[in-house]
């Protein structure tokens, strides 16, 4: 059992590293490169803007990690994440995401690795805690890539990370 506990601890640390040390700095830099208008730009009405993606990442972190793992009340409004069209300044967007990431990181830092196989319910579906965390890390990576692509498209800069 000790090997499983050590593996669980390593898994949690790896997930925290990916979110806080790899994905977060990239998103933060991209938003800094964009103007207010570019943050809300969308190539087509069916595409998401960087602003929408940030709202979506924030909602996902809060619902899956803070609520699903940490037990706080789920107050997510997923429809708003995609329907917003310019009303939130980029500094407010990035601050909200940073606060959600810090709270998620704190929740994961306190998580006992023995709980990784426990079940929790997120979005009306029972999932094991390790799966909930994996979904968040994968999800964040996907949208981080989209944010980088949009930033390169709008600024013409070859961002190096």
Image: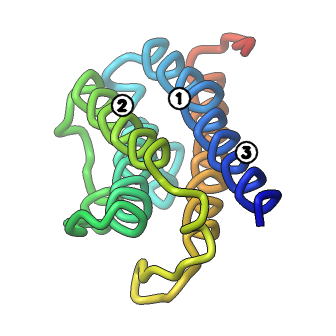
> Which residue is label 3 attached to?
10
Answer with left or right where residue 10 lies relative to residue 25. right
Residue 81 at x, y = what percent? 32, 56
Q: Secondary structure at mark 2?
A: helix
N-term mark: 2 or 3: 3
Q: Is residue 124 above or below residue 155?
A: below
Residue found at x 57% / y 59%? 133
Residue found at x 51% / y 51%? 44
> Which residue is label 1 attached to?
24
Label 1 Cα crowd, 10 Å radius (few <14 / some 14-19 / many 20+): many
N-term mark: 2 or 1: 1
Residue 150 at x, y = what percent? 59, 33
> Which residue is label 2 attached to?
98
User: CA separation, marks 2 and 1?
Assistant: 8 Å
Q: Are marks 2 and 1 in contact (CB under 8 Å)?
A: yes
Q: Secondary structure at mark 1?
A: helix
N-term mark: 1 or 3: 3
Q: Secondary structure at mark 3?
A: helix
Pick out the residue farthest to the front.
2
Residue found at x 39% / y 40%? 106
Question: Is the N terminus in the top left, top right, bottom left or bottom right quadrant?
Answer: bottom right
Answer with left or right where residue 117 lies relative to residue 72. right
> Which residue is at the front of the view, 124 or 34?
124
């Amino acid at each position: 059992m000790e090997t499983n506990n050590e593996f669980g601890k390593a898994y949690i640390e790896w997930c925290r590293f990916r979110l806080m040390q790899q994905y977060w700095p990239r998103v933060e830099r991209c938003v800094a490169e964009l103007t207010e208008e570019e943050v809300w730009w969308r190539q087509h009405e069916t595409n998401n803007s960087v602003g929408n993606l940030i709202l979506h990442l924030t909602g996902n972190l809060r619902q899956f990690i803070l609520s699903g793992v940490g037990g706080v009340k789920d107050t997510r409004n997923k429809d708003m994440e995609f329907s917003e069209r310019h009303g939130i300044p980029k500094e407010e967007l990035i601050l909200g995401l940073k606060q959600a990431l810090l709270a998620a990181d704190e929740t994961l830092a306190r998580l006992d690795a023995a709980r990784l196989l426990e079940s929790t319910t997120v979005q009306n579906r029972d999932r094991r805690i390790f799966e909930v965390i994996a979904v968040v890390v994968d999800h964040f990576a996907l949208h981080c890539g989209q944010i980088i692509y949009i930033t390169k498209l709008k600024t013409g800069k070859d961002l190096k990370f």
